[in-house]
Image: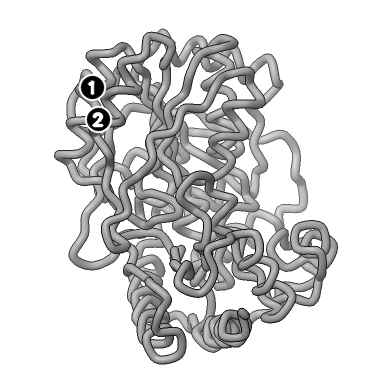
Amino acid sequence: MKYNFDQIIDRKNTNSTKWEPEVLEEMFGTSDVLPFWVADMDFKVAQPIIDAVVERAKHGIYGYAVRTDSYFDAIINWTSNRFGWEIEKDWIEYTPGVVPAINFILQTLGKSGDKVLIQEPVYYPFKRSIVNNGLEPVINLLKNNNGKYEINFEDFEEKIKDPDTKFFILCNPHNPVGRIWSREDLIKIGNLCLENNVFVIADEIHNDLVYSGNSHTIFASINEDFAMNSITCTAPSKTFNLAGMQASNIIIPDSKIMEEYRKTIEKHNIGGQNPLSIVALEAAYNYGEEWLEELLVYLEGNIEFISDYLEKHLPKARFKKPEATYLAWIDLREYETNGERLEKIIIEKGKVAFDGGSWFGEGGQGFVRVNFACPRNLLKEGLSRMVKAVKNIG
């Protein structure tokens, strides 16, 4: 392999949200923990990205920046080559992140009291965004079939028919359970949403992190009706470890909705972009594919390592290998069903920080989400600490 993903890089004192002692103290009550929580990677980015950012930085002037055709072409070509979806420049709008975009979408299209359907356990900022904008979250609880999650369509259909339900947030690939929803599932979702005038907000930020034997279908690529009844949120941040660059691609095929969305972001004075993030995105999409393919091989190795390690050292833990994402959703309910107590024990006894399953809402109690986008020896140390803590639960 060209890239060395085994290299352990010290991220302390680099303003890393995941590693900064002040943040760990605030989140976990102590900075004396090994962190596997925030969904970014402990790997260096692809060399072409480093080269592009360094070269731009050497210019020495960091004034206001504008996105040119090369920026949009990089997004368009990547989306076409990886997913077979032909998008247009006018469909793309910059937003600093997917979560801000979801907030802006709800502000643009929603009104106080509207209901938003989400599928828990799910990425917790969804619910926060809904509530913060005066809307009401409605839960379609995923079915856990021996670790493989499926959509409860009977419940989905019942809740989507509520005339107050105006939005559905699709998380695909799903965070934290690691599922890629099938094309058939997406068609069923899309048709139900169309029939009931429910608008789809598709968070597809993990769509490049797909493992062998699986494929990802972008919801809006299925047909024009779905495209016009949805907004797709993507970014290079998860794929290429560029979260700090704050560059997300919000794809809106409906020109009227795009016009309204742009009015919202103008109210917040969002639009200008960091010049370094512009060249980083272009380099990632134009020259980062080799790095990504090597990364996926390494991450699959980490998945196998987790599976083998748990089977050997924590046999009552349940772990279903994810189809996508670099997030392991580990069921520890055989050891402790009280989620808050489990999380406290792992922090205090194991000195390791994961995302607690309870953070992800209904169905998350007794689980932990482990970010395995890190060197294998670091992952081994984190799992060892977790095992030690869980084995001492009494």
Most extreme residue toward the left is 184
Q: Which residue is under mark 1? A: 192
Does the CB distance between marks 2 and 1 fall below 8 Å?
yes
Choose top left, top right, bottom left or bottom right for residue 120: top left
Relative to 325, is 296 above or below?
below
Residue 132 in sight here: yes
Choose top left, top right, bottom left or bottom right for residue 254: top left
User: Where residue 55 sits in the image (x, y, percent)?
Assistant: 63, 60
Residue 7 in sight here: no
Tell me if 219 is positioned left or right of 33 in this view: left
User: Where residue 389 sits in the image (x, y, percent)?
Assistant: 63, 82
Q: Which residue is under mark 2? A: 189
Relative to 197, is 22 above or below?
below
SS type, badge 2: helix
Q: Of 100 and 263, which appears nearest the observer?
A: 100
- Residue drawn at x 37%, y 71% is 319
Relative to 243, is 167 above or below?
above
Most extreme residue toward the front is 394
Tell me if 132 is positioned left or right of 14 in this view: left
The quadrant the C terminus occupies is bottom right
SS type, badge 1: helix
Tell me if 204 is positioned left or right of 366 in this view: left
- Residue drawn at x 34%, y 75% is 300
The quadrant the N terminus occupies is bottom left
